[in-house]
Image (cartoon, rainbow, N blue to C red):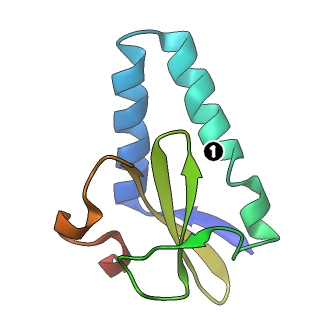
């Protein structure tokens, strides 16, 4: 399976990198690289992440990386990265919901 990123997920990634970069550009680059590498096994094991309780759908999953939830959707031919959200944020209040992205 191939992994694809939605535009909102890419913007989340860039925002995280920009925030960390305020303290250290080196650490920001390392963190983002490790975050992306955390998704490497998804191609072979698409259901390795946990179900997202707020979504109530079996194909909406998440991987926790440090303090971030990487939310993705398992589809027939691909895995779609939907969002990267800090664990402290209330996902129930977020609009639109990441899994509502097409």
Question: Which of 51/12 is in front?
Answer: 51
In terms of image quadrants, where is residue 4? bottom right
Question: Which of 14/20 is in front?
Answer: 20
Task: Please give left or right for residue 96 compared with residue 13 in the image.
Answer: left
Residue at 41%, 87% (x, y): give it.
Answer: 56
Residue 39, given in percent of the width and then of the height, sits at 68, 54
Q: In the rendered image, which quarter contains the C terminus?
A: bottom left
Which residue is situated farthest in the right direction here? 44
Q: In the rendered image, which quarter contains the N terminus?
A: bottom right
Residue at 52%, 69% (x, y): give it.
Answer: 72
In terms of image quadrants, where is residue 82? bottom left
Q: Is residue 29 above or below residue 32?
A: above
Residue 70, given in percent of the width and then of the height, sits at 50, 56
Residue at 35%, 13% (x, y): give it.
Answer: 22
Q: Is residue 25 above or below residue 4?
A: above
Q: Is residue 46 above or below residue 21?
A: below
Q: Determine which residue is flagged by label 1.
A: 36
Question: Which of 19/14 is in front?
Answer: 19
- Total count of labels: 1
Residue 101, given in percent of the width and then of the height, sits at 33, 76
Mark 1 is surrounded, within 10 Å at the Cα level, by few (under 14), some (14 to 19) or many (20 or more) other residues, namely: few
Q: Is residue 67 above or below residue 10?
A: above
Residue at 43%, 50% (x, y): give it.
Answer: 10
Residue 75, given in percent of the width and then of the height, sits at 59, 85
Where disc 1 sits, the SS reads helix
């Amino acid at each position: 399976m191939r992994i694809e990123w939605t535009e909102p997920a890419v913007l989340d990634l860039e925002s995280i990198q920009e925030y960390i970069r305020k303290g250290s550009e080196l650490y920001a680059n390392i963190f983002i690289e490790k975050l992306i590498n955390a998704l490497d096994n998804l191609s072979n094991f698409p259901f390795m992440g946990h179900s997202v309780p707020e979504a109530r759908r079996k194909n909406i999953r998440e991987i926790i990386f440090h303090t971030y939830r990487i939310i993705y959707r398992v589809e027939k031919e691909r895995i779609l990265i939907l969002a990267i959200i800090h664990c402290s944020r209330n996902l129930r209040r977020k609009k639109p919901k990441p899994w509502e992205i097409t």
